[in-house]
Every structure is written in structure tokens, then in C-alpha cells.
Image (cartoon, rainbow, N blue to C red):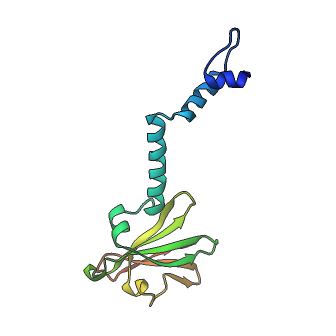
Amino acid sequence: MSPLGVCLAGKVPPGHVPNYLFVRLNSMLRKPNGKVIAITCIIILVLFCLRIVPIGASPIPFIFASGKGMDINSDSGINYSVYFNDAGAAHSGNHWTWIVRDRYLFRTVEFSGFSDPGVRYSDLPVVQKDNEGQYLVFLNSRYGKISKRVRFE
């Protein structure tokens, strides 16, 4: 039997020092133990959850009441997705809005705040422009009319 076959079989010939890491790794690959399976499942679950709910968003409203809006681009070429918290007939007032950036393995909320219903239903633009550049307009509360401008680059 070859030295590789001896190491794979777990038998050590006299006078031979085996590569214990190789033997241990091989035994884990042949019959994975519960810890390896549990850690792998946890990593897959966390990555899956981070793809569904962006970092910075509340999970329950985002999963059950969010609606995808349009995609917007910044002047620097970054693509953002717009999501609105819209519970349908149960909703009243201004819409909570998430501006989400996709970062391959996960997504992050870059901007958030209340938006006018006109923005939600595409009557008003999400990104507004003036001489100073692009900006987002958010309202101060669910029923408020006072707006704040957030620089969008």
C-alpha cells in the first residue's frame, strides 16, 4: 500500500511520522461530526438572512410589509434599491423608506426615513437635483410635512 493510502486508512507504518493534520482533515471529510455540520448551517443561515433583510432594517416590517420600489443610481455610479414599508389598506400617513445598497454577500441600509406617498406611488422623484448636487427628501414623522434633505452622492 502507498504512503498516501496508509495515511488515508489511518495506519502508520513503523518509523513513519504521518501528517496528523491531513489524517484529521480526511477523517472529518469522510464522516463530518455534529459541530462541523452545525457551524456550516449557521454560516449559511446568517448569509441567507443578510441577503433577505439588509443590515440596518427591522426584520419584521421588512419581511412582511416592504414593497420594492425603483432602482436609483448615484453620481458616483453606485446602484441602490428603494424599498417602502407599505402594509396596504392598513397603512396610513407617510411611508418609511429604505435606500439599500447591495454588497454581494449582504445588503446594507444606506439611507432611511419617511417619504411622501407621492414618492411611493412614483408621482414625485426619490432623488431630487439642484445646483448643489443630488439629495433625498425625507419627512420628519409619519404624518409630518416638514422635510429634511439628505445629501446623496
Task: Decide if residue 2 is on the left or right side of residue 137.
Answer: right
Front residue of this view, candidates 35 and 123: 35
Instruction: List x then y, in percent, for residue 58.
Output: 36, 62
Residue extending farthest top:
15
Which residue is farthest right?
A: 2
Considering depth in this image, is 98 or 144 the residue closer to the camera? 98
Say which residue appears at 57% left-offset and 35% top-offset: 29
Picture coordinates of residue 147, whole percent (x, y): 39, 80
Q: Quadrant location of the N terminus?
A: top right
Placement of the C terminus among the 4 image quadrants: bottom right
Q: Quadrant of residue 120?
A: bottom left
Residue at the far front: name it: 1
* Figure check: 124 above or below 95: below
Image-based side of 22 in relation to 140, left or right: right
Residue 138: x, y in percent? 41, 77
Expressed as whole percent of the image width and height from the top left, the position of residue 105 reads 55, 57
Q: Residue furthest left?
A: 90
When asked about the image quadrant of residue 56, the answer is bottom left
Residue for point 43% across, 84% down = 119
- Number of numbered discs visible in the structure rendering: 0
Image: 44 above or below 101: above
Left or right of residue 40, residue 14 in this image: right
